[in-house]
Image: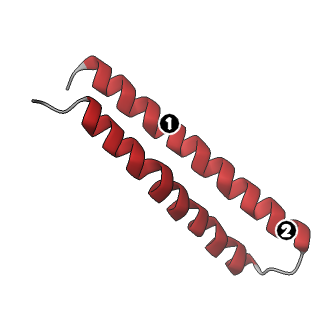
């Protein structure tokens, strides 16, 4: 693995982790403000945020990295 690919992969993993953590935090905060959701509903929403971030951001990032660093 080239150094540039390693740096790009590490950066994308860190960015995805940060975005996922931030999304989970915001979902939980908004649901706690409403005070009408149980802890299990908040946990389910946080898991939904993880799935959404991973699908919508992680998938395209993976495709982009594979396109940029493909061996021809």
Nearer-the-camera pick, 56 or 45: 56
Classify residue 71 as left or right of residue 68: left
Dot 2: few (<14), some (14–19), or many (≥20) neighbours within 10 Å? some
Residue at 73% x, 62% y is 27
Name the quarter where the C terminus is drawn: top left
Q: Residues within 10 Å of mark 1 (few under 14, many from 20)?
A: few
Q: Position of residue 26 (x, y in %)?
A: 75, 55
Q: Quadrant of residue 2?
A: top left
In the rendering, which numbered label is found on residue 14? 1
Dot 1: what SS? Answer: helix
Q: Is residue 68 above or below residue 40?
A: above
Mark nearer the N terminus (2 vs 1): 1
User: Which is nearer the eye, 58 or 42?
Assistant: 58
Q: Position of residue 36 (x, y in %)?
A: 86, 81
Instruction: Point out the residue furthest to the left here.
Output: 72
- Colour logic: secondary structure
Residue 43 left/right relative to 6: right
On the image, the x and y values in percent for residue 60 come to 40, 47
The number of numbered badges drawn on the structure is: 2
Q: CA distance from mark 2 to mark 1?
A: 27 Å
| Residue 4, above or below 27 | above
Above or below: residue 24 compared with residue 2: below
Q: Which mark is residue 36?
A: none
- Image position of 44 (left or right of 32): left
* Residue at x 45%, y 30% (from the top left corner): 11
Q: Write down the residue under mark 2.
A: 32
Residue at point 18% right, 33% down?
Answer: 70
Within the image, what quadrant is residue 8 found in? Answer: top left
Residue 64 position, x and y percent, is: 35, 38
Tags 2 and 1 touching, CB below 8 Å: no
């Amino acid at each position: 693995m080239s150094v540039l690919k390693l740096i790009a992969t590490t950066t994308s993993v860190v960015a995805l982790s940060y975005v996922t953590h931030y999304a989970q935090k915001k979902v939980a905060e908004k649901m706690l403000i409403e005070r009408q959701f149980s802890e299990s509903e908040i946990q389910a929403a946080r898991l939904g945020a993880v799935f959404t971030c991973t699908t919508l951001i992680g998938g395209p990032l993976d495709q982009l990295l594979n396109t940029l660093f493909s061996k021809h």
